[in-house]
Image (tube, rainbow, N blue to C red):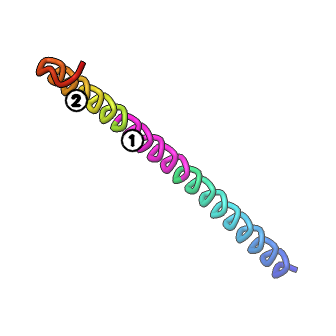
Amino acid sequence: MASKGLQDLKQQVEGAAQDAVTAAGAAVQQVVDQATDAGQKAMEQVVKSTQETVDKTANQASETFSGFGKKLGLLK
């Protein structure tokens, strides 16, 4: 009878340990997912900012060359 009680206790402990491992794994996965999302959002912001800078620079260059063309009488 004591053997049956020990076997039940062993199974309960093993089940609790497996549940703890599963919960820890889920928590780690959630942290990884959040870090991945944050990294992706940061990269998207960098790309957006870079594209805006490129667009502004291209517009400024276009306006500058247009101004030179007008001053030189090449453009109206």
- What is the three-letter code of the residue carrying label 1? Val
In the displayed orientation, state which residue is furthest to the right. 1
Side of 43 relative to 64 (left or right): right
Q: Residue at x 65, y 60 (%)?
A: 20
Position of residue 41 in the picture relative to residue 2 (left or right): left
Q: Which mark is residue 61?
A: 2
Q: Quadrant of residue 70?
A: top left
Q: Residue 53: percent from the left, percent from the top?
A: 31, 32
Of residue 21 and residue 13, the one placed in the foreground of this image is 21
Label 1 residue SS: helix
C-alpha gap between disc 2 and disc 1 = 21 Å
Q: Which residue is drawn at the image coordinates 25% and 28% (left, top)?
A: 62
In the picture of the structure, the residue carrying the numbered disc 1 is: 47
Q: Look at label 2 and name its amino acid.
A: Ala
In this rendering, the answer to whether 34 lies above or below 17 is: above
Looking at the image, is mark 2 or mark 1 earlier in the sequence?
1
Residue 51's spot in the image, x, y percent? 36, 37
How dense is the environment of label 1, judged by Cα within 10 Å: few (below 14), some, or many (20 and up)?
few
Q: Which residues are magenta?
A: 33-49
Task: Identify which residue, 47 or 76, lies in the foreground.
Answer: 76
Residue located 81% across and 82% down the image: 3
Q: Mark 2 touching mark 1, by CB under 8 A?
A: no
Front of the two marks 2 and 1: 2
- Depth check: 75 or 34 in front? 75
Q: State yes or no: residue 52 in magenta.
A: no
Q: Is residue 44 magenta?
A: yes
